[in-house]
Amino acid sequence: MSDKIRKIRGTNFTKEEELLLLEEVDKEKLIVECKITNKTSSIEKEQAWTRIACRFNSRNLECRSIDQLKSKYDNLKSKARKVVANKRASLKGTGGSPTCGGRFDPIIGSILKIINIKTIVGHTSKFDSDSSCADYDWKKHDIPLLHAHSSASPIPVRMIIEVKETNKEINDPIPSCINDPIPSCSFTNQLVIEEQIRKEETEKKEEQRRQEEHNNDIIRFANSRTISK
């Protein structure tokens, strides 16, 4: 009985397969992650997943069905949500200071490249692909996808790269500094998450300050009208 169930479910995905899947989903992310629900969008998503499955199976030894790929992708997103939620709680516990935790799974880095960080922790944003299908600007928070079939250890990359407006072509060669070794306590993907959370907290405080000023202006205006009467 267990053999039959295993045959139906298929073998577990390897890390290489997970990275390959995310690499292919990344090419279709604007369609896959779009939350518009109508007949047209449903057809487009099915077509996108068909393309993903074709490319995936052409590069993988074991053939995976569309349903298997969808299910695995949903599971990986769920895993990413938990990781970022735990990181948010950890930052709050340390007052927003970075922590020297273990290095993140490169799978998480690939997920964060596809979906906005604020989306997976339950917040909306003008960059939120889940709400607007807009392409988040990852040039400022670059998380390169790792090659799925590389047998070497994860490639060290700097996770936060400031992109200045220049006249250079977008396809300029990647600076050699990207391949600089990462210190043991630089926690690749953590840098991106911590930076985004701190930025979000700052924006929230600024919004509260503006709202308080607006409320005070209304009160002052109301008081001035009362006095004039």
Image (cartoon, rainbow, N blue to C red):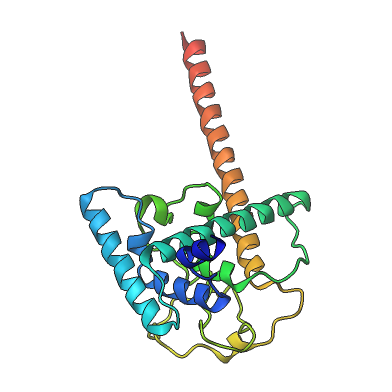
Percent across and percent down for residue 197 are: 62, 55
Q: Nearer the viewer, residue 147 or 223?
A: 147
- Reply above or below: 212 against 54: above
Residue 36 placement (x, y as % from top left): 31, 50
The picture places residue 70, in percent across and down from the top left corner, at: 42, 61
Residue extending furthest toward the top = 229
Left or right: where 73 falls relative to 51: right
On screen, residue 139 versus residue 58, left or right, reads right
**Residue 128: which quarter of the image?**
bottom left
* Residue 115 appearing in the image: no
Depth order, front residue of 215/11: 11
The image quadrant that residue 207 belongs to is top right
Residue 147 visible? The answer is yes
Q: Residue at x 51, y 72 (%)?
A: 18
Residue at 41% across / 53% down in the picture?
A: 130
Question: How far from the left and from the top, in percent, is residue 120?
Answer: 53, 53
